[in-house]
Amino acid sequence: MTAWIPLTRPTNTARAEALGLRRASLTARGLKLNRETRIVVGPEIEVRLSFTESRLLELFIRGPERVFSRDEIADWIWPGERVDARTVDVNVGRLRRSLGPCRAWIHTVRGQGYSFSRPQHVGRRRPRAQTNVPAHPQQRSAANG
């Protein structure tokens, strides 16, 4: 009989590896993160992430649709260290830039933190409303005569 091992904290990583419970890659929402090489593959992207970016994406993949507070993110990436909330924001921005066309999958939830989910319009262009009315007031008066 094996003992129950909580795997929510990074400090348990060595124990998980020893038991063979740690997977080499994680997949969610069409993105696949290889944890050893830190390469993420998805629709229209294949890029190598920094260590911090890969840890952040790993957290989002492990909890899709969940809203993570800045404190939770800081505890996951920098356990036991005091980290400014702005540091988390900067690293989320870096991850978004690295993900390129998939950057829209990381959502800012105002006053709460960040979440990870695939937008409904990915891969499709949203139709734009078409109008024949000029946008600028001077253009309207010129068009009328």
Image (cartoon, rainbow, N blue to C red):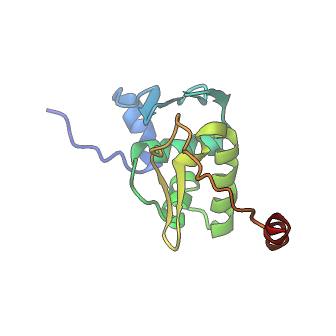
Residue 3 is left or right of residue 49, and the answer is left
Q: Where is residue 108 shown, x and y percent of the image?
A: 55, 61
Front-most of residues 10 and 59? 59
Give the answer, above or below, for where 27 lies relative to 62.
above
Give the answer, above or below, for where 55 lies relative to 77.
above
Give the answer, above or below, for where 82 lies relative to 6.
below
Figure quadrant of the C terminus: bottom right
Q: Where is residue 111 shown, x and y percent of the image?
A: 52, 74
Front-most of residues 8 and 142? 142
Residue 121 is left or right of residue 18, and the answer is right
Residue 28 is left or right of residue 110, and the answer is left
Front-most of residues 48 and 77? 48
Figure quadrant of the N terminus: top left
Q: Residue at x 40, y 31 (%)?
A: 22
Q: Where is residue 130 shown, x and y percent of the image?
A: 62, 52
Q: Residue at x 68, y 67 (%)?
A: 86
Q: Residue at x 86, y 67 (%)?
A: 142
Query: How many numbered marks appear?
Result: 0
Q: Where is residue 50 shown, x and y percent of the image?
A: 68, 38
Q: Quadrant of residue 42?
A: top right
